[in-house]
Structure formats: C-alpha cells, structure tokens
Image: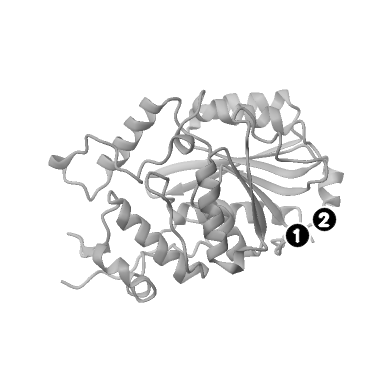
Amino acid sequence: MTPKTNTEKTNLHPRNQHRCRYDFKLLIENYPELTAYVSINEHRIETIDFSDPEAVKSLNKGLLISYYDIQNWDIPTNYLCPPIPGRADYIHYIADLLAVSNNGIIPQGNAVQGLDIGIGANCIYPILGNAEYGWSFVGTDIDEQAIENCSKIIEANPKLVDFISLQQQTEARFIFKNIITPEDKFTFTICNPPFHKSQEEATKGSLRKVNNLESRNLADKATKPVLNFGGHNAELWCEGGELGFITQMIYESAKYPLQCFWFTTLVSKQSHLSSIYKTLGKVNAVAVKTIDMAQGQKTSRIIAWTFLSEIQQKQWKFE
C-alpha cells in the first residue's frame, strides 16, 4: 500500500514548518529510532499511535533534530510531551505581535527576551523561539525536577547555552514575584497555564484525550491515565484552574508595568474570556489583543496585554 502524499494544514500559521503532513522519510533519516513507531493507517497515511507516549516522544525527537537542530532532547516519565506544531504557532504569533510595533519587521536576535512561565520539563518554547528568531529566554517553573531536566537539555545542546537561562519559582502562589527584578526588561511573556482545577479533573481530562485519539479502537478504551501522556501535576492543574491562574497572572503583571512590553498567555476555554477582559479592565491595561489559533479540531487563543502607553510602545528598543 503506497502512502498518500502530504496535504497542507492551512489552519496553522503561514510560517509554521509543520503545515504539511509529517515527512516520516526525513524524520526517520535523522532519527532512525522513530521507525519502530511508524505505520500506514486505513487512509494510506503514514502515522504513529498518538496515544503511545514513547511514539510521541520519538516523533518530537525527530522533529527537533530535523527542523530545529536540537540533537539531544528528552523528558522524564510522566511529564508533558508537547505537540510541537501547536507550540510553534504560539511563537510565530508572538513574532507577528512584536512586528506591529517594529515597523512591520519581526525583531530577531538575543536582545528580544521572552519569559516562559511554566517552562515544564520540555523547554519547548525557548527552543523554538531561539531556533526561529534567535530570541533569548528565561524559563521558570515551580517544579525542581522540571528545571533540572531543562538544564540537561540546554547543556546537551551547546547552541542553547547562551540563550536560555532558568529560574525556579520557590513560592508557588506567585507567578512574577521573585522572577522579575527591577533591572529586567522582557519583550514578552509566554505561558501555557494549567488547565484543570484538581488532580481528579486532570486525570479525567487525560483519559478523555487518550480515548478521543483516532488511532484508538473504541473497544480498547483506556481506564488509567497513560504515563508521560497526561503531564505532571504542576503542568496540568492548580487551584482555580486556568481562569484562576490567568487572573492571578494579570493582577501580578500590573506590578511590573514598565518591565515587559507584552504579557501573553494561552486561553483554552472561550468561556473564560469575558472574565479575563474584565480583570484586564480593572488593572487598566492600555491595550489588549486576542489572537485566535487552531490545531486540528482544537481551537485556542492567545491573550496579550500591555501597560505601556502608545509613546512608550514606540520608544521600546528591540535591539
């Protein structure tokens, strides 16, 4: 059976390198271990079992080697394995946002510094942002093991050493406190906030995600969360869930109005938007932007806000 040729995923950002179906020939050439997980499905399309955490991790390794020159990448068991095309979209939309204030030109180089809130164990946003635009990053997390694994990734890929630094948030109830100092100037923040309100809700969500995957037979429904698929506690849930986390982030961001151009976060639930807009109004955000994104059947959006006046925005130095 001959595999079908690639078709373009038009809902991804125009600069996203993954708009076409995965080129498994290229991926396997660069990461031969992926071969064990690739098969041809009933639609004559080469694919992997996306409910298999080892298969997803191998796919990510192939993508990172082939498109981003990351030769050594791994995550510990039970940590979130990120979907790289969707993460890349966030980075490209941030680039577009910055270009608006830079005469339509995407600012590049390490003078553009991002702050990744909740970097996780995978270090994926800084990796992609540096590979695509040469940006530098500070990555933070409350999880010591996550920070340690990111440190291993950085050390194993020397090209990252001068561009990504890490800082553990030692007080879990805060987001920016202890992280942003009076001397800091961040071009943007980036965040994929915990989605669920409790461990129980997170477990149910992980099971739904596994069982909804097309590759899974209806008679083979999972009853236990798959290790390394659902994600670690800190990545998946926090008190108040997504809305609680983002609300806290907004209130804290108001304490650092001149130290970051754009504060941004993903918002998965559309129903949270009205509350988020109200909170942004309460803290007197000068400008608020909503950027829609879509990957496959999933829709999401980025909310970005700034406290800089129009004059201050024009005076911001991107170099």
Compared with residue 194, is residue 49 higher up or lower down, i.e. above or below? below
Residue 7 in percent (x, y) is at 35, 65
Residue annotated with mark 1: 111
Q: Hey, what amino acid is under mark 1?
A: Ala
Give 129 or 275, whichever is nearer the viewer. Answer: 129
Q: Hey, what amino acid is under mark 2?
A: Lys
For residue 83, side relative to residue 92 (left or right)? left
Residue at 63% in and 35% down: 170
Give the mark nearest the N terminus, 1 or 2: 1
Quarter occupied by the N terminus? bottom left
Residue at 82% in and 55% down: 317
Residue 168 in percent (x, y) is at 62, 42
Q: Are marks 1 and 2 in contact (CB under 8 Å)?
A: yes
Residue 128 in percent (x, y) is at 55, 59
Give 256 or 318, whichever is nearer the viewer. Answer: 256
Q: Secondary structure at mark 2?
A: loop
Residue annotated with mark 2: 317
The residue carrying pointer 1 sits among few (fewer than 14), some (14 to 19) or many (20 or more) residues within 10 Å by Cα, namely: some
- Residue extending farthest to the left is 219
